[in-house]
Amino acid sequence: MAIFPTQYSTLSSVALKDFLSLKYGLKGTNCRLLIHNVSDTYILESEQEKYIFKIYRDAHRKLAEIEAEVELLTILNAKGAKVSYPITALDGAQIQSFNAAEGTRYGVLFTFAKGEVVHDLTDEHLKTLGKEMALVHQISSSIELKNPRKAYNVDTLLLQPLAVFKPAFEDLEEEYAYLTTVITKVVAEMEQLDLTKFSYGYCHYDFLPKNFHFESANALTFFDFDFAGQGHLVNDIASFYVHYFMEVMNGKMTQQEADRAFAVFVESYRTIRPLSDEELKAIPYFGFAFWIFYLGFQYENFDDWSSLFFGPKFLKQRVGVIKQWMDWYIN
């Protein structure tokens, strides 16, 4: 009997443990699935060490994109940035391939980001974060990778997603009309910015607290560069500001407290590299684009991982969040 077509398999953690132990010379490690989502993330643990093994979906990342991510992280690590980086196997390979049910899938073994997620960031945390993010940008703005990564611009962040998620709003005409109106407004205002003066390079594009671990207030590690792409580096600053927007919206702090904390981060960032007042003033627009881009991504990947939450209730809630951002920071 022929094998029925598969679009997103889950590889056995037991088989992976044996495979990776052989490939990387690991001893006494256990392997378990940590996240089945955008990609599959496994954690390998021994008494002495931890590692992260990530297996990409072909529908999400092609080999050339994975090679670019590996190259970027290898360069960042070599130049002193605090990142989780790819580990080279005994045979010299950094990317492994698997003949999965749906076809070839690729995986990378990463160092483990020691520490934990910290949502309530103290001034010391923020000073460390500002300096370390600036160092990443110092490096990522001065290199050109051999393989391409996604370009982040008005088209890919705003106009393309608006077209992509249109079918999801078939019964939510009022909400889609609102998004069309505000996206048109933001695009027009962004086109008035002199973006030639904005720093450009490879962005992480998801610099939320869930993607960096603090070992102490003075030591952190960035990870999950899956969305790394070329664009204006203020995209990363804006993605971090989203954290404070959510804190204020959820009643965990006031806007005044959020702005003070963010100013500590900015001051620290500026001790390493420039961040112009014009870039800071543009954060509302780039932050708005962050919400629109991710809504498009969630719809595009609905089949593989969004089905549990992506529906009319979620869409109405998300449009409400976008409206709140517009009301507070743009209108």
Image: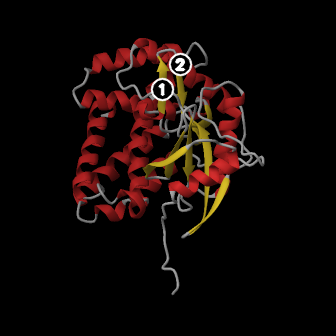
Mark 1: which secondary structure? loop
Q: Amino acid at mark 1?
A: Gly
Label 2 near label 1: C-beta < 8 Å? yes
Q: Is residue 153 visible?
A: no
Q: Is residue 249 above or below residue 218?
A: below
Left or right of 205 on screen, residue 106: right
Counting from the top left corner in percent of width and height, residue 253 is at 26, 21
Left or right of 231 on screen, residue 94: right
Left or right of 173 on screen, residue 215: right
Q: State the residue position of label 2.
A: 219
Which residue corresponds to the image point at 30% horizontal and 56% vertical from the top-left? 310
Distance from disc 1 to disc 2, alpha carbons, whole Å, reads 9 Å
Q: State the residue position of label 1.
A: 115
The numbered mark at residue 45 is none
Counting from the top left corner in percent of width and height, residue 206 is at 47, 38
Quarter of the image that includes the C terminus: top left
Mark 2: which secondary structure? strand
Which residue corresponds to the image point at 60% horizontal and 29% vertical from the top-left? 197
Q: Is residue 234 above or below residue 270?
A: below
Counting from the top left corner in percent of width and height, residue 141 is at 66, 31
